[in-house]
Amino acid sequence: MKIDWRVPLSLVLAVAIVLVLSHDANAQCSMCKAVVSGSNNGRFIRNLNIGVLVLLLPPVSIFCSIFIVLRRYRNSDQAGESHSDSR
């Protein structure tokens, strides 16, 4: 029995997008937060938040790429087993 993961995955993705877009991202370490709290410049605070999020992209993309490669390897391995069983 094969489970279709597209519907739950789409639902989780939609909820994640809504949560991310609904409020400001406070993606700051304690030192960055201390610098921001001492500043009254809104543009500086916004640019610092964007910079932190930009620095988050490479590790997340590497992490996701590893899981995509592992999933493809697992799916190709399962397909190889089903072909060998039919002989």
Image (cartoon, helix red, strand yellow):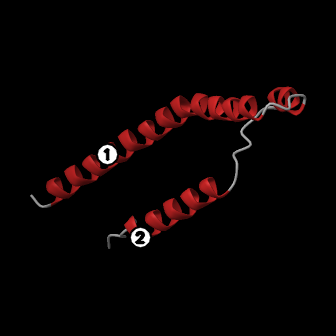
Report, in whole angstroms, how far the alpha carbon at label 2 lies from the one at label 1: 19 Å
Q: Would you say 48 lies left or right of 65 here?
A: right
**In the displayed structure, would residue 11 be above or below residue 19?**
below
**In the displayed structure, would residue 75 be above or below residue 86?**
above
Nearest the viewer among 2 and 15 is 15
Percent x, y of residue 71: 37, 47
Picture quarter containing residue 33?
A: top right
Nearest the viewer among 6 and 48 is 48
Disc 2 packing (10 Å; few <14; some 14–19; many ≥20): few
Disc 1 residue type (three-letter): Arg
Mark 2 = which residue? 7
Picture quarter containing residue 73?
A: top left
**In the displayed structure, would residue 73 be above or below residue 84?**
above
Q: Would you say 59 lies left or right of 67 here?
A: right
Q: Closer to the observer: label 2 or label 1? A: 2
Check the picture and name the quadrant holding the N terminus. Answer: bottom left
Q: Residue at x 46, y 68 (%)?
A: 8
Picture quarter containing residue 86?
A: bottom left
- Contact flag, marks 2 and 1 (Cβ < 8 Å): no
Question: Which mark, residue 72?
Answer: 1
Label located before the other in sequence (2 or 1): 2
Q: Would you say 10 lies left or right of 39 here?
A: left
Percent x, y of residue 44: 73, 28
